[in-house]
Each structure stands twice: as C-alpha cells, then as structure tokens.
Image (tube, grey):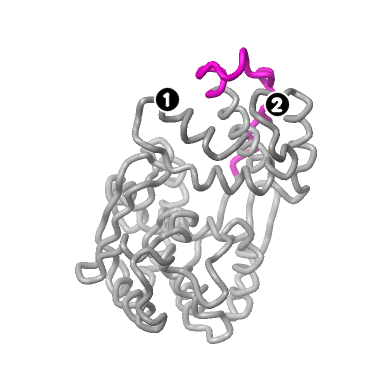
Amino acid sequence: MRHSHINNLSRKIRGSPDIDHANNRVQLEAYVYPVLGALPVTAVAREQGDAVMRRLPTHLSRNSRRHVAKIVIHVLNLAELAGYIERNPLPKGWVPKPGTRKDTPVLFPAEDAALLASADVPLLYRLFYGFVHREGGRRTEAARLQWYELDLKNGVVQLDQNKTEHARWWKMGDGVADALRVWRMVQGWPEDTALVFQDGEGGLNVDHMSSKVQKHLKAAKVSRVRLFTKGTNTLRFGTHAFRHSFTTRNLALGKTDDWVRTRTGHTSNELLRYRETARSLEELELGRCGSAR
C-alpha cells in the first residue's frame, strides 16, 4: 500500500481532479505503514487489517480508530474497482461503529486574549492558535499552509487543494493579515513555498498537539475547569476545538451558514450540530475574539 495507490486509484475511478490526501497520508504513515511495510495491496488480507487495528495506540478515541479503518477500507475498495484485487478482503462491519458525538468546549474571548498574550507560550504556537481560532480552517490545512496561499496585501486566504475537493478563499479577519505580515518579516521573508507556521525547528505536528494546547492554556493562567475536564460525553479543549469554537462563536454572532462554510468547509448538515451550543453561547453575550470579527 503506497502513496501512489491512493492518488492513482482516485483519479482512475472517480475521474475527478486530484484529491488532497495529505491527512490520509499522515494516518497511513503513523498507523498503517509501520505494520504493513512494503507489502503490496494485492497481498493484504484480513489478518493484516486486524493487525493494523490491534497496533493502534490505546489513547486513540473510537472515532479516531474508525477513521484509520475507513482509510484502509477505502484504499482496498479502490483497488478492487480498479482490478488490482478480486475483492476487498475486509468484510462488512469491519470498520468500528462510530462513538457517541462528544461535546467540545468553546474558548471565550477573554481566554483567547490571555492565551495569545502570554509570553510563556512560544510565539509560533500563539500565532497558530490565533489563526485557526479566527479563520476556522482545519488544523491540518493551517499546518500545511504555504506563503503563496496568502495574499497579505489584500488579506486573502486561497486554499487550492483541501479536504472539500474544491478551492476555497476568503478575506481574513481584521489584524490577522497584519500579524502574518510581521511574522514573515521576523522569519526573514521565507520563500513562497515555505510553510507559514514553522520556526527553526520545523513545522507543527498537529496530530499530537492537544497536550501542548492544555499546557499552554495553563501557562497563560486560563483556569476554567470545563476546558481541562473530560467526561462521558464531553472532551477537553484541544487543537480541533479551535475550529469548533470558531464555528460555534460565529453562528452565535449571527454569521450565515455560507459565511462559516467558506472558511471551515463544513456541509449544511454538519453545521446543524453546532446550532444548539451556539444558541446557549449567544445568551452569554461574550462578544468577539480580539478585533478579528
């Protein structure tokens, strides 16, 4: 199972433009390739699929385990349709059932301000947190963002390849482009193809950043218990929660579904689950984060 299998099979079967499989590759490289190695797709059987699932880290949630399984199933389905294998060796029901959708906390504007102002949090992380909390894109999209995708003169983000399979662009919030312009100057005006969110130690690994988010919130003296508490139906505040917080906050502020979707890539059905929390947040009248909205 190699990277080229995914891209080549997607183009052959779907007849559509290239799909951004960067997030899928991250999952494959972290959890699938270490088990299967260079084993060709024609040699993958139920035994190998089960081995991948057994080797998944115990800290992964049910939905994260399900995501890995769905990637494996998808590749094998494409291989079957393309004629590489006679049939998918993994049976129906092999993918774990989805877990209960858990509630994610919203970061309040005062907490956002404290986090971004804290000198105890590295500047690279503060900039990253501020960007995703104000622009709402997926954390993987932000981590892969390159300078040529930003029009800092006009304050525009232009995403070509992304999970939604179509280009998205929008005008950044007030102050965001200014902050990024200063960041690029501090970085010594890196080339257009360089990652935006990187320093001398390289880019950000957003798949293992939740513990850093928790650490940084505490360093910034943010102490609301809900952000750090995990329950039966609730999650702690992590990297993905910035996107959730952005969506909920802006719906509460009266932004339209189209306005939100342009930035987040959500579907209309996906936005429905944010509405209940948004109504509760609206009653708190917390206002906007910084001057971004």
Residue at 47%, 51% (x, y): give it: 277
Q: Residues within 10 Å of mark 2 (few under 14, many from 20)?
A: some
- Magenta span has 90? yes
**Vertical order, 10 against 163 (above or below):** above
Instruction: Left or right? Give the position of 263 relative to 8.
Output: left
- Residue 215 location, x and y as percent? 65, 73
* Secondary structure beneath label 2: loop
Tag of residue 12: 1
Task: Please tell me which residue lies in front, 202 or 141.
Answer: 202
In which quadrant of the rendered image does the C terminus lie? bottom left
Q: Residue at x 26, y 56 (%)?
A: 170
Q: Which of pointers 1 and 2 lies earlier in the amino acid sequence? A: 1
Which range of residues does the magenta coloring cover?
78-101
> What amino acid type should be assigned to the residue bearing mark 2?
Val
Compared with residue 93, is residue 156 higher up or lower down, i.e. above or below? below
Q: Which mark is residue 44?
A: 2
